[in-house]
Image (tube, helix red, strand yellow):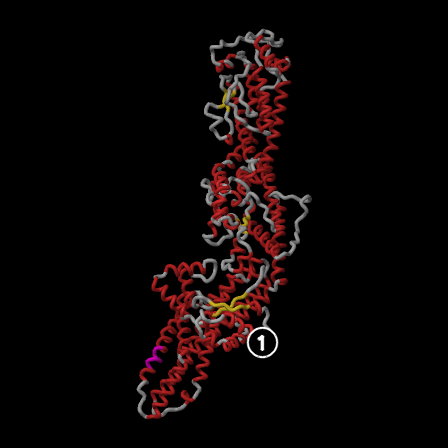
Amino acid sequence: MDPYTPRTRPGARKKNITLSAKEYTKITGTIASVRRNRHFNDDIDEDLDGPVHTVRGSRRSSQEPSFIAETSFVRAPLNSRVGTTSFSPKNKGKGKEDLLDHLPLDVQEALILEDLLFVLMGIEGVHITYHPDYSPEDDDPLQGIRFAIASPLDPSIRDLAERVLPLATYYTAISAFVESRSHLEFGLVNHALCAAIRDMLKEYQTLLSQLEHAFNTSPQFTLQKLWFYVHPTVHTLSLIYKLVLELATVDDDDGSSISSASSDPEQAARDEALGLGGAKLKAVLSEITKSSTSAAIPVKGGEVLTVIYERMQGMSGDPTARKVYGTLMGAAGAPYAEMLREWATTGRLHDPYEELCVKESKFISKGILEVDYTDEYWERRYTLRDGSTLSSKRQHAGVPLPRTPGGRLPGGACIPPMLEGWKHKVLLSGKYLNVIRECGIEVQSIQPRRDQEQFSMDDEKLYKFVEDAYTHANRTLLRLLLQDQQLVPRLRSLKRYFFLSQASFLTHLLDLAHTELKKPAKSASIVKLQSLLDLSLSSEDASFREDVKVTMANTGLYEWLLKVISVSGIIGGEGGEGNHDTAAHEEPKKDRDKDKDEKKALLAIDALALDYTVKFPLSLVISRKTILRYQLLFRFLLHLKHVEQSLASMWIEQKTTPWRQPVPNHPEFEQWRLRVTLLRTRMLSFIQQILAFVTFEVLEPNWRSLEVKLSKVTTVDQLLRDHVDFLDTCLKECMLTSAKLLRAYSRLIVTCSTFALYSSSFTKSANQALAAAEAGDGDQAMSKRWEFLKKFESNFNHWFFHLDCVQYYASSENVTLLPLVVRLSGIKTL
C-alpha cells in the first residue's frame, strides 16, 4: 500500500453526530469511500506534479467510481504542497509507525494537517487515531473521543498537533451531549441550552470549512496557522466541555427504569382491577416515586441554570467565560422565564417536565377544605419544590434528596441562585391568582404582549415584573376577601357567636334547651338543639346566623386539651388531632377503658359546640384549622357561663325560707348554712373573675388589635398569619395551652359545677335540719352534712392554692396574667 493511502479500521468508527443521523452517515460514508479509493503508485516518480496512473488505482476506479478519477483531487492538496525532493518509502515489512519519521518536515506537516481536519470533526485519521485507552463501545460518549498520534513525528509538529487535539475531544463530547439531551424527558431548559450550543458548534463547523478551504487552496497554510486560528476556539469549547461534564453527572438508566415500570400496562390493569386506578392515587404514587431518589431525576430545569450560573460566577474574571456562559444562560433561561411569567400573571402552571421551582399537588382540591384541619389546600396545593414552604417533616417527605456529590437539589427542586430571594413572591403571585380563578373571576393580567417583550433569567426586568405581578395578585385577592366576600363582618359574626360578645342568645338557648342539655351527649338531639338555636337567634338582628350550626364533640374539653398538650405542646395546627390519636393509642388499656366510661357519662352541655360554614375563598381564612380554635374558646366560655348560671340559680334558691329562717337552738346548723353560702360565694366569684378576665382583658383587647392589623394588612399571607396569631394568643392568654394551669383551674371549674348540681340536696338537708330543730329530738345527720360540705371545701381550697403558679407564669412567661393574679387574690381572703 502506498504511503498516502489511509488505513481503514473496520468496526472502530464511532458515530459522533453533529447534525442529524442521516446527514452524518451520508457525509462520513462519502469521506470514507473517497479515502479508501485514493491510492498512489508504489513507485513515486521524481516529478510529483505529474498525473498518477497505476494498474491498481485504475482497477479500483473502474470498480468503485469516486473522486479518484478527478486528477485535480488527487494532486491537491498534498501533491501541490510537496516540493521536488524525491524520497523512497520504507519497505512494507516496516510498520506504518516508522513512516512519518523518515519523511521531510513539509510532508509530515501536510499529512498531519489533513488528519487534523478530519479529527477535529470527530473522524479518525490515518496517523492520528483513537487513543489506545479509548474504546468506542465501552467509554461514555459524553466524555468525548480521545485521539493520539500513532507515528513518530518531528517534536515541533507533534507539539503543535497535540495542542490542537483536545479540540476534537471537546467537540465530540459536546456533540454527544447535544444529541442525548435533546430528548423530551430532559425538558425545555435543556432543549434551549442544546439549541444555543448547536449554534456555537455551527460557528465551529464554519471555521473548519474555512480552514479546509485554506488547506486545499493555499500552499502557505501551515500547522502554525491552523493553531493560530483555532486557539481561541479551544478555550471556548473547553468552557462548554467543562459545563457539559458537570451537567452529565446523572445515570439516565435509573430514571428510565422507573418511568418504564410506572407505565407498564399489565401493572396498570392489575391496579385497576384492585381498585387502585384512581387519579388521586396515581398522582400520590407518582410524587412518591419521583421523590424517592435524586438519581432518578436528570439534571434539568433550575438545576441546569444553577450550574451555568455557578460556573459563570466562578470564572467571572475571564471575559470569554463570562460571555459564553452569559449567552448560554440567556438562551437556557428563556423557557424558564416564560414559565415564570405565565405562572405569575395568569396562575396557570405549564410545567410538563417539572423544571419550575413551583410544584402543584393536583390531588389536593378545594373540596378538601370542608374536612381539612391542617390547611392542606393553602399550604400544599402549590408549594416550592425545595420544601422551604413546608412546615413539617411529614410534608417534607415529598422533597427529593440532594445530590450525593455537592448536596445540590435535583431538577426543578434546585432554585437558581438569582431567583432565591424572589421564590416566595413567585409562588404567592400564582397562588393568589389561582384562588381568584377558582372563584370563577376573570384575572385581569398586567402582562405585556408576548411579541412585545421577552425575559431572560439574567434580566433585571424579569424580577421587576415578578414584583409587579405579585403586588397586583395580592391586591386583587385582598380586595376580593375584604370587600367582595365581607371578611371583616364575617369575623365579627364569629366573635359574636363564639366569643359571646353579645351573649343574650346563649342565655336564651340555655333556658330553652335546659332539659335537652342535661341528657348524655349521645342521646341529645342535634336537630332539636339546632332548632332551639335558630329560635334564640331569630329574636336578634344577627348577621350570617344561617351559617351557625350546632355540633357535638366526642371528648370533654379539658381531657382533649390535656392530651394534646402532653404530646405536642400546641393546640390545633396540623398535628393536633393526629397527635391526639397517637396519644390515645399509646395509653394503657385501663386508661382507655376509663376514657370510654367518661365519654359515656359526657353530658350534652359539656359536649355542645358551634360550627360555622363558609364558602370558598373565605374558607381559606376561616378554615377548619381556625374554626377548631374558635370552638375551643367557645366551649371554655360556655362552660364558664353554664357554671355561673348554675351558681346564680343556687343563690336564688338559698334565698328561700330554709336558708333564711333563724334557728336559735341550733348554732351548728347556722354555721353550716353560713359555710355553704360562703363556699358558693367564693365559687361564683372565682367563675365571674375568670370569665371577666377572659372576655374583657384577653378576647376584647386582642380583637381590637386584630381589627387594627386588618385595616393595615398588605398581603394575604399576612392576613392569614395575623388571624391565626390572634387565635393562638387568645388560647395562650386564656391558659388553655399550659398543662399545669389548665389542670388546676379545670378541676376548680368542675368542682364548682358539681357543687351547683347538689343545690337541691343542700336545700333538702336544710329542711331536714329545720324539722329536727322544731321537733327537739336533736339532729343526728349533722355530722354527715359537715363531712359532705368539707369534701367540697377541701377540694376547692386544694386546687385554688394551686393557682399560685399563675403568679409565677405572670412574672416569667406571660405578663398578661397579672390582672388575673390581682382578681384572684381577693377570693383567697374570703
690 relative to 789 in the view: left or right: right
In the picture provided, is 103 more to the left or to the right than 459?
A: left
How many numbered discs, if any?
Answer: 1
Viewer-closest of 82 and 11: 11
What segment is highlighted magenta in the picture? Answer: 786-791
* Quadrant of the rendering where the C terminus is positioned: bottom left
Image height of 796 relative to 57, above or below: below
Residue 743 visible in the snapshot? yes
Q: Say if 800 sits above or below 179 in the image.
A: below
Taking the spot 36% from the left edge, 77% from the top edge, the residue there is 792
Asked whether 787 falls inside the magenta stretch, the response is yes
The x and y percentages for residue 266 are 49, 42
Local secondary structure at mark 1: loop
At 34% from the left and 79% from the top, the residue drawn is 790
Of residues 779 and 455, the one drawn nearer to the viewer in this rendering: 779
Dominant secondary structure, magenta: helix
Q: Position of residue 575 (x, y in %)?
A: 45, 58
Residue receiving disc 1? 539
Q: Is residue 422 left or right of residue 518?
A: right
Q: Is residue 357 magenta?
A: no
570 w.r.t. 540: above or below: above
The image shows residue 461 at horizontal and vertical percentages of: 63, 46
The image shows residue 649, relative to residue 198, as above or below, that is: below
Mark 1 residue type:
Ser
Q: Position of residue 201 (x, y in %)?
A: 59, 30
Q: Is residue 232 visible?
A: no
